[in-house]
Image (cartoon, rainbow, N blue to C red):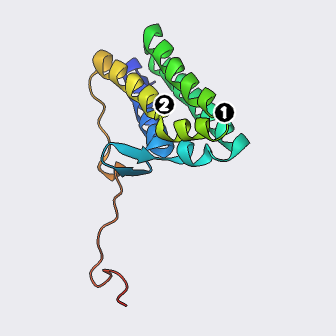
Amino acid sequence: MATTQDKAHRAWRAAERIKRLSDRLVGVGPIGLGLDGILAWVPVAGTVYSVGAGALLVVAGFRGGVSVITLGRMAAYLFVDTASSTVPFIGWTVDTLFPGHLMAANALQKDIEARHGPSVLPASWDRKRKARPGRRGVKI
């Protein structure tokens, strides 16, 4: 039987996956781009993805036992992120640059850490490609 702390840390890890996929697939310093920003330029797909990922974050928050105030903050971030994509071009640009899923996931994670301590990610979590000897690029 999973304890409350186990459930909370599972929710923390789910939020980590969603924020990386949504807003940090590619990152340069503080700026990141993920599926949410890319799909924002595809009229229906962007909204569907944004709502779906947001719903997964809120469900993870419920399962993790975060406070109602944190759930409200998360909902506000997700609403702004999703609502901005309804306006063509300008809204899509805002949606690309506004990391709503990242902000909602961070709020969830901070709440869980305050209640249950930090969550530990497995070593295999950050799968950065290792440089292979002899494969440094194509010489022209």
**Which residue matches tag 1?**
87
Q: Mark 2 vs mark 1: which is more N-terminal? A: 1
Question: Looking at the picture, how far across and down is residue 43, in whole percent?
Answer: 71, 42
x and y percent of residue 134 in the render?
29, 85
User: Few, some or many C-alpha atoms within 10 Å of disc 2 (few <14, some 14-19, many ≥20)?
Assistant: many
Between 60 and 50, the residue placed more toward the observer is 50
Query: Which of label 2 and label 1 is nearer to you?
Result: 1
- Residue found 32% across the figure and 41% down from its top: 121
The mark total stands at 2
Secondary element at tag 1: loop
Question: Residue 106: horizontal and vertical position, in percent?
Answer: 38, 28
Residue under the image location 61 percent in, 43 percent down? 40
Q: Amino acid at mark 2?
A: Gly
Q: Which mark is residue 95?
A: none
Q: Give the residue at x 41% y 35%.
A: 13
* Residue 9 higher or lower than 37, as above or below: above
Residue extending farthest right? 44
Question: Quadrant location of residue 93?
Answer: top right
Q: Which quadrant, please, contains the C terminus?
A: bottom left
Residues packed near mark 1 inside 10 Å, few (<14), some (14 to 19) or many (20 plus): few
Asked whether, in this view, residue 89 is left or right of residue 26, the answer is right
Q: Residue furthest top?
A: 68
The disc at residue 100 is 2
Q: Where 49 falls versus 112 (above or below)?
A: below
Residue 105, image quadrant: top left
Relative depth, front residue between 7 and 18 = 18
Measure how far apart labels 2 and 1 are at the Cα level: 16 Å
**Horizontal and vertical percent for residue 62?**
51, 18
Q: Residue at x 43, y 34 (%)?
A: 102
Q: Secondary structure at mark 2?
A: helix
Inspect the image, locate mark 1, and give the three-letter code of the amino acid beneath it. Answer: Val
